[in-house]
Amino acid sequence: MKKRTYLTTFLMILLMAGFLKGQVFTDYWYGSVSDAGIGGSGTAVSSDIWSSHVNPAGLADWDRLGFAVDYSQPFSQSFTKNTRAVLATALPKSLGSISLHGFTGQLSYSGKDLSSETQVGLSHAFYLQKDLRSSLAFGYTINYLQLDYGSTSAGRTGDGSDGVSLGSGSTWGVDIGMKASLRSRAWAGFFLKNINDPSLGSSGTSQTIPSKLEIGLGYQPYYGFTTTASIEKILGRDEFQVHAGLEYYVLEWLVLRTGISHEPSQLAVGAGILTKWGNVDYALVTHPVLPLTHMFSLRFQMKQHDR
């Protein structure tokens, strides 16, 4: 029991240290459960309802009304949980597709919220050019971001009765992305997150939310088997992450995924069950030090729109 308590305390300190280091708003390396299954390398190939989180340009391929939700507990810890939802539909004629999405994340201890994050966003994507051999799509996202550090600190008593407010803040972020394809077998894309350098807090304590660039490639040597790779870099920092993955359709209704990422070194596996009404996706991600992370998503969709 004591060992588990020590592990929980260590994980909470580690997660909170991420905030103190400057990562004001949590940014995960995966954009969706299916993207996590291929090691977060879907920047160039994303084309489903979750594209607003992976590369908004991929939303241009979405051609119906759909709704999806996902849930995860990072590192299998009960004190932290993340939930996301998205509603997307195709627009008439050549206007592309649009989605509305939301995210909530909480870090709590002993029934009290230590911090909570909320994100609500609108994404729009459309084709700049498309023919039988090639295509070029552009997409953008406008996000409202809110961070709340809880109602009060622990105070001298330790129970919060004489604590002080830790504050909250909100801001707007803008993302853009592009995606190109050749003969529906090769893809290239990029995703630039927070291009407007949003910040949280007042002028004296303001902290900028980092901007991030992702560049990816994808190739399908034969139908049903896709290879992916991407590089991710926080602008203004020397470090970068490398992601790579494989996706294979074993059957028309069953897809298997695997992937790796570097810095930190992580291995991911996943699977999806596809039906006419929607998808069920699962991903498992390892960590060199921390416990496994399990992720689930469920998608519902209507009949394909005619364009």
Image (spheres, helix red, strand yellow):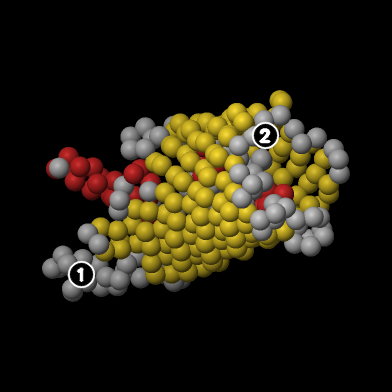
Image quarter of the C terminus: bottom right
Q: Secondary structure at mark 1?
A: loop
Residue placed most toward the observer, 79 or 202:
79
Q: Residues within 10 Å of mark 1 (few under 14, many from 20)?
A: some
Answer with left or right where residue 35 lies relative to residue 99: left
Residue type pointed to by label 1: Gly
Instruction: Please name the residue shown 75% across and 62% down the image.
Output: 91
Give percent across and percent down for residue 244.
56, 32
Classify 269 as above or below 128: above
The answer to whether 213 appears left or right of 295 in the picture is right
Residue at 43%, 69% in the rendered image: 169
* In front of the other: 199 or 119: 119
- How many circles with numbers are drawn on the protein? 2
Query: What is the distance, in whole Å, between disc 2 and disc 1 at their CAs?
Result: 51 Å
Q: Which mark is residue 96?
A: none
Residue on which disc 1 sits = 160
Residue plotted at (47% across, 69% down): 170
- Amino acid type, callout 2: Gly
List x then y, in percent, for residue 172: 55, 66
Q: Is residue 271 left or right of residue 304?
A: left
Answer with the quarter of the image where residue 305 lies: bottom right
**Does any portion of residue 112 appear in the rendered image?**
yes
Residue 220 in which image quadrant = top right
Is residue 199 visible in this depiction of the protein? no
Looking at the rendering, in which quadrant would you find the N terminus?
top left
Percent position of residue 100, x then y: 60, 63
Q: Are marks 2 and 1 in contact (CB under 8 Å)?
A: no
**Secondary element type, mark 2:** strand
The extreme top residue here reads 221
The residue carrying mark 2 is 218
